[in-house]
Amino acid sequence: MKIISFHCHDGHVRTGVVLNDRVLDVSEWVLHLPLSEAALTHHQQAGSLPPLGGILRWLSAGPEALRQLQAHTAQFADQAQWALSDVTLYAPVPRPGKIIGVGRNYADHAKETGVAPFEKPRIIFKMPSSVAAPGAAVRRPLDVHKLDFEAELAVVMGAYGRDIDASTALHHVAGYTVLNDMSAREFQFDISPAQTTFAKSMDGFCPMGPWLVTRDEVPDPQNLEVYCWLNGIQMQHGHTKDMLFSVKALVAYVSQFMTLEPGDIITTGTPAGIGAFRTPPLYLQPGDQLEFEVTGVGRLSHSIA
C-alpha cells in the first residue's frame, strides 16, 4: 500500500492511498481514528497535543491502523476520485519528529571515504524543517558551493519503542520511502570541528517521497537496490544487503538511547558515488535534475534552484 500526503485544487493538506494511477482520499477517515494507548500516554506525559489528522494521526493509531486502512481502502476503492498526475505531493511525512541518519553504512562508501568501517553505527541528525516535497526545486544557499547528494532508503517508524530487540525491530516500522540526504560539504569536511547536523539541515536538504510504502510490501529491506541519477547520468548504484548495519540493527541500536516515535525517520546511509569523493569532485549546481530510486519503494525526483 502506498500512502501519500498531498493537496489538490483547494490547497487543503490531505492523506491518500495510491491505487494504480488513482488516489483515494482517506483524510476524513483518518480524522476519526482513535489514538493508541501508547500515543495518549506519550502526549499526556509530554504535555503536547496529539496529531489531529494527516499521516501522523494514522501512524499514532497503533498496530491495527494498517489493517483498518486496508479494509477501508478495499471497501471504498471505487471512490478514488483523483488521478495521481493531478495532485501535488508533499513528503509522505511532511514534518517528522526526528530524522536520524547513519554515516558510512555501506562498505563501498566507507572505502571511498578512506575510513575503516565503524564498529557501531555513526549517528547523524537532520532537522525536521529540512524536509522537501517530491518535485521540489531545492534552493542552494548563496554561501554553499559544495552541495552534494546521497541516495538513501528511509525507514518510517510506526510505533513507540525503547530498547527494542533486533528480532522484533521491523514490527515497529510502518514502511519505507526514498530520501536524498543533501549536504553542504564545506560545513562537514572543511572546518573543525565539523558542523555535520548544520551541513545536512538547511532548508530543503531532505527531499523525501514520493510515498510511504507499507512494511508488508517490503518483506526484506536488505534486498533492495538504491540508485541516483544526476542529469540523466547514473551516479550511484548500491544494494541494501551491503549495509554494515541492517535496518533492524539500526532500529534496535538507536532505541537504546532514545524513544522512537510514530513518524520518526531513520535514513540508512548511502552507497558509493557521492560527489565529494569523485575525481574531480562533482557538486550540485542550479538547474541540475536529480532522480533517486529504491526498488520496490519508489522513485523520487527534484531539481536544484
Image (cartoon, rainbow, N blue to C red):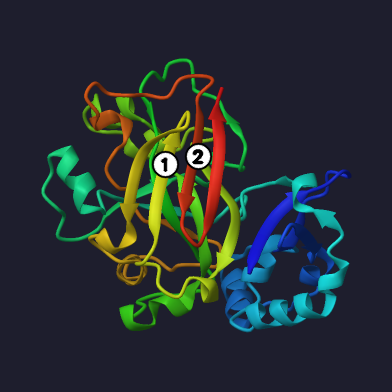
Q: Is residue 48 above or below residue 63?
A: above
Dot 2: element: strand
Question: Pointer 1 and pointer 2: residues touching (CB < 8 Å)?
Answer: yes
Amino acid type, label 2: Glu
**In this rendering, would 243 be left or right of 89?**
left
Q: Position of residue 294 (x, y in %)?
A: 45, 54
Q: Splitting the image into 4 quarters, where does residue 10 fall?
A: top right
Q: Residue at x 25, y 29 (%)?
A: 278
Q: Earlier in the sequence, mark 1 or mark 2?
A: 1
* Viewer-side residue, 16 vs 157: 16
Crowd around label 1: few <14 · some 14–19 · many ≥20 (10 Å)? many
Q: Is residue 130 above or below residue 248?
A: above
Q: Quadrant of the N terminus?
A: bottom right
Dot 1: element: strand
Amino acid type, label 1: Cys
The residue carrying mark 2 is: 291
Q: Can residue 268 be seen here?
A: yes
**In this rendering, would 264 be left or right of 11?**
left
* Viewer-side residue, 48 vs 260: 260
Q: Residue at x 66, y 76 (%)?
A: 61
Specify the label residue 228 is tagged with: 1
Crowd around label 2: few <14 · some 14–19 · many ≥20 (10 Å)? many
> What separation in Å lies between label 1 and label 2 (alpha carbons)?
6 Å
